[in-house]
Amino acid sequence: MAPFTWSFRVRYHECDPQGIVFNAHWLAYFDMTMVELLRDALGENAYRDLPDTHRVDFVVGEATVRFRAPARFDERLTLEARVERLGNTAMTTTLRALRAGELLVEGELRHVFVDAKTWRKTPIPAAIRAALEPYATAA
Amino acid sequence: MAPFTWSFRVRYHECDPQGIVFNAHWLAYFDMTMVELLRDALGENAYRDLPDTHRVDFVVGEATVRFRAPARFDERLTLEARVERLGNTAMTTTLRALRAGELLVEGELRHVFVDAKTWRKTPIPAAIRAALEPYATAA
Amino acid sequence: MAPFTWSFRVRYHECDPQGIVFNAHWLAYFDMTMVELLRDALGENAYRDLPDTHRVDFVVGEATVRFRAPARFDERLTLEARVERLGNTAMTTTLRALRAGELLVEGELRHVFVDAKTWRKTPIPAAIRAALEPYATAA
Amino acid sequence: MAPFTWSFRVRYHECDPQGIVFNAHWLAYFDMTMVELLRDALGENAYRDLPDTHRVDFVVGEATVRFRAPARFDERLTLEARVERLGNTAMTTTLRALRAGELLVEGELRHVFVDAKTWRKTPIPAAIRAALEPYATAA
């Protein structure tokens, strides 16, 4: 199954004196990719409306990033995301960043769903689970 | 009268491919300086506690930055701030950034006090005004 | 004459605990707008290639930002830029940020052209001047 | 053996609309910690001078971050770093962030030493290895 993909350009201020995207920005790129995946899965304002619509929020529990090659200012990157695992309260997503087909960076994010009020772990709401399943590897 | 001063080092990720602090970060440095000025004037958690303690927040209405010379990674900068004007609902602060006595960047921030609930302009609370007056140019 | 315009969405990490775009990020938005204006005026990699193609770089000499209303996560902003003045070594650009027609932020940037090697002020190259004139207010 | 430690305050613009440090900033905090560890090990400008002094640079090959509890504006964090492994061309560092003794975030960074000119993997220079060994777990 094809992963979710979207693309954007590297901004000047995301690059450091080595002339390459500073390593921490890749986690921001991953976060932006989750926003777009949720928009694709759940509609226009899905990420913003999680607390109001579903009484949940979701937070990053663990992140891993492997750096293969640097990206530079103004380059167009394509980000791919696959939902690797949809557990009871957590989901794991695999992300890859490519430039013209070359893999630059890859990693995983584990998100935990929490109650929007108490911030305690809470099961993934059924509507969200149903919307995310098409993005899962072994759907 | 001596201005309020504090100092810190330039971080690597604040510098861009030209090897210098990216221009937008200077507004962040100015903001950090206001946090420290309020700490000095009003106590440890003054900035964070504005809404709870004084039922106000303060927001930037206008910012001007003039760039004289660049700053680079790991350099120690000294930031100076003087309260230039304490109006009814607004305050203007003059800021200067120096490296070993050399002026690198200077500018002004105009802050507006707003009600913490409605975000409408509100007069500067008397306790805040009294605490800021010692930092005013013509105090 | 119509100004140069482009648009983009506010990213989550550009917003602060007040839930609004942190003030310093507006200077980054202005910078991104200059990149797009130069792309429009001078071609695909214009900003990146300034040093190689024209032996110049351009740096911000002064920036002013006036904040009218806040922007929030995921909102689509339209940025407008007009070249206000093309001097011998400097250019002044007026920028406005709108959301659905409402003016949120406006400001000016004064850029100075410098020699890419010495970083001394240098006249705006004729090819760049010619390409920017169509974006000037009184062109 | 005690790890290397240093501390700093969370800045306002590092926090997101949830009111907590945005996840990507933790990688920046880790990077800042490596700068301080190298300063401690190799002297004042060690990080900045790696290319000139030792003809090497070092880049992040892999990063992992586990988020236990959030940090908020103005809180004072203590970062600990231990060199876990000093290989031929790579080093692995374990990092922990604490607030008043409570573990908030932990992770690992794998850095690869590269030739400052060619950016190819290169053995860790003997002087750097000697200086880092006291920070290694099993030194």
Image (cartoon, coloured by chain):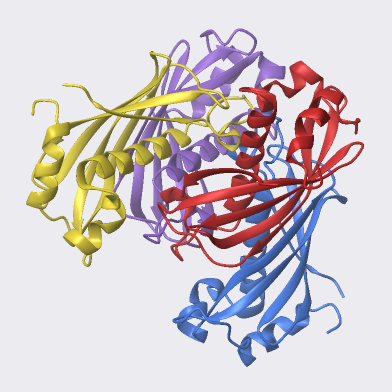
Chain colours: A purple, B red, C blue, D yellow
Residue at 46% of width from left, 10% of height from top? A88
In the rendered structure, the answer to whether residue A89 lies left or right of residue A101 reads right
Q: Above or below — where is A85 with respect to C27? A: above
Q: Above or below — where is D51 with respect to D76? A: below
Q: Above or below — where is A104 with respect to B130? A: below
Asked where in the image residue A61 lies, by quadrant, the reply is top left
Residue at 15% of width from left, 40% of height from top? D132
Residue at 60% of width from left, 33% of height from top? D12
Inspect this view and state whether residue D43 appears: yes
Q: Above or below — where is C5 with respect to C128? A: above
In the rendered structure, the answer to whether residue A116 lies left or right of residue D63 reads right
Between B79 and A131, the one lying in front of the other is: B79
Count of numbered tags: 0
Q: Position of residue A69 (x, y in %)?
A: 31, 54
Residue at 48% of width from left, 12% of height from top? A89
Q: Position of residue A121 (x, y in %)?
A: 51, 9
Q: In the orientation shown, which residue stands out farthest toward the front?
A: B1
Asked where in the image residue B50 lies, by quadrant, the reply is top right
Q: Position of residue B26 (x, y in %)?
A: 60, 52
Between A131 and D10, the one lying in front of the other is: D10
Asked where in the image residue D83 lies, by quadrant, the reply is top left
**Which quarter of the image is occupied by the C terminus of chain B?**
top right
Q: In the orientation shown, which residue stands out farthest toward the bottom?
A: C126
In the rendered structure, the answer to whether residue A127 lies left or right of residue B59 reads left
